[in-house]
Amino acid sequence: MVVHYSPPWANTHIIGIAGSSGSGKTSLAVKIVSALNLPWVVILSMDSFYKPLDPEQSAQAFRNEYDFDSPNSIDFDILVERLRDLKQGRKAEIPVYSFEKHQREPKTTTIYSCHVLILEGIFALYDPRVLELLDMKIFVDTDADVCLARRLARDVKYRGRDIHGAIKQWTTWVKPNFELFVEPQKKNADIMVPRGIENTIAMQMIVKHIQRALLNKSKEHVKALRALGQGHDADEPLPPSVKVLPNSPQLQGMHTIIHDTDTSREDFIFYFDRVAALLVEKGMDHLAFKQKEVKTPQGNKYSGLELSRDVSAVVILRSGGALEVGLTRVVPDARIGRLLIQSNVRTGEPELHYQKLPSTLIHDSVLVLDPQITTGAGALMAVTVLKDYGVEEDRIVFVTYLASMVGLRRLTKVFPGVKVIVGKVEDGFERRFIDERYFGS
Amino acid sequence: MSQQLQPEEPAVAAPIGPQYKEEKPEATVSTPIKHSNVHILPQTPQLIALLTMIRDKTTVRGDFIFYSNRIIRLLVEEGLNHLPVISHPVTTPTGRSYQGVKFEGKICGVSIMRAGEAMEQGLRDCCRSVRIGKILIQRDEETCMPRLFYDKLPEDISSRYCLLLDPMFATGGSATMAVEVLISRGVPEERILFLNLIASPQGIQGFAERFPKLRIITAFVDQGLDGKNYIVPGLGDFGDRFYCI
């Protein structure tokens, strides 16, 4: 039975901030981000979702005659799609809109694994489909004269417009649209923030509320992790997708050296590298191969095999670095991606701090390297990330040296298609010590 | 030792891959050898792919060296598993006691020049400071028989396990002579491990019968020998491909 695992960034907490142009939405969003002081908060501006303009509209835009302040100028369909992806914990490609060309740039920006998303724009509380996805709806209510003053200053100072054009824009589009479309959004809001960022009490309330929501999510995640892979028979054998290295005399000897606290660092590194190469060699056997006929220098034919796909590796930092020497002994030209996953010292929750993956990953066979599986939480997270990148489960081989029974069960119950190569299986929990010994810190 | 010409035996083709895979690509695998002192590496897809790479005449030298080293390392790892270990309890960094083992007995490598020397790096990858002896055997132009030209072996070789290195085993003339040299220096036959990449079936059978206590670790037993006593399909001249071409 396949068990579902939901990463901590799924069910993203989405906050919508609407308000008139010049009301201070962006400043409020930035203030919230800095008050939260977490790496997983992302601001998404609705400016990215302007519809691309046809040549006629574009000409109007350059004459200040195009209405950018009407909801019609926003591509709500794409916005809703991307927000839904993020809410599901998936990766979302955000369009990049060029104000010079009034077109979307060919490139996109990727948003992935944020825990909190702040959507800001004059129509953040407009579309009912967006409202459904929002966890908190804020309307910034600033006096119209303050908004106009800010807008004029910004248009003239930073956007190279002349004062008459800017005033024309305000009276023709901004003000009527505000009354027609922007202001009515107030009835959708949970919180009205008068005076924008000057309103420190409102700010504190908002931040407290988000922090509470995040703490609850983190508790839920840790609870769900604990529940995974439990309630099974302790004697249940490991699934066939787990391949343990044959317990040969040499391997036993190397286990002893690696486990011995009296082993010098020099020896530790030498023997760990040797085992690592064996683990990676074993992992290679589970990649896809295809037939290949070759001719020897004497012209004899041999019908052999070759790898069907290039090999990429994903190293789970920091400890995964200890398997990299082994990797280069076997596949020196593997493209290598890196994920930094750390356990939060207070909650024990694994956290994804950094990810840099090769773009070719979805076409390759992928070896995931982490020398130790303890609770299995980091491994689950890593495979989740790869699957979200579009790597199929049966192309992933997870290479590890020491693994706990519980961790292996969690990983294989959630991802039965992933092959796991293990040097040694442990009954209890062994804390992470391989990377400490290998790197000496 | 069989020197006669043998007709090419049919190659053994088999689907290769882990059991769970439904579709397995087919490839030629090692000829089976029934002698219990011949250990052929498991014919995994990865090993077959490595052998494919080094047999291919279009493989450039850098790749040839790299891929043959990978096979050699697997041979050394397999060979070392035939050495004894003794119980050795230790304490782990987390404070638990661990019932371990440690390697017992001294070893040394002996390479048959020049191709055998290509296997020294793989040996050193697994045993850092291993002592290595050398034996030079060349074919005597007049008699066409192998002749010992040179040897330099560790003095205490008789008390060591010897890993004898030679990547290609065709008729086995040099390997047989090398084993005789080792035995004459007091190394018991049962402490000699012969590590080899590709062997001919007739050669390896004769060798295994002649030295029943010696252990042979090979990656692949090929189909046979051609008229010039080259292994078929083989991979050409190993020494040339490793050192020169």
Image (cartoon, helix red, strand yellow):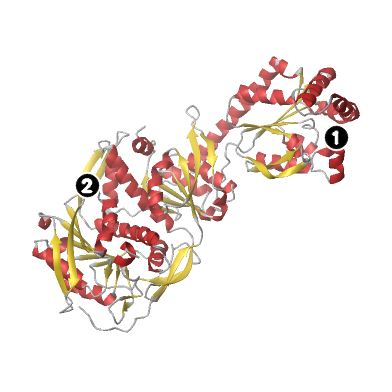
Q: Nearer the viewer, residue B63 or A216?
A: B63
Q: Position of residue B39 (x, y in %)?
A: 27, 66
Q: Nearer the viewer, residue A218 or B183?
A: B183
- Picture residue at 27% right of the left edge, 39% below the top: A260
Name which residue type carries label 1.
Answer: Ser
Q: Position of residue B55 (x, y in %)?
A: 38, 68
As displayed, is residue A262 above or below residue B117?
Answer: above
Which of the chains bears the disc numbered 2? B
Dot 1 alpha-carbon crowd within 10 angstroms: few under 14, some 14 to 19, many 20 or more: some
Dot 2 alpha-carbon crowd within 10 angstroms: few under 14, some 14 to 19, many 20 or more: some
Q: Nearer the viewer, residue B189 or B50?
A: B50
- Picture residue at 81% right of the left edge, 21% below the top: A147
Quadrant in which the C terminus of chain A is drawn: top left
Residue behind mark 2: B102
Q: Position of residue B87 (x, y in %)?
A: 20, 46
Which of the chains bears the disc numbered 1? A
Residue behind mark 1: A70
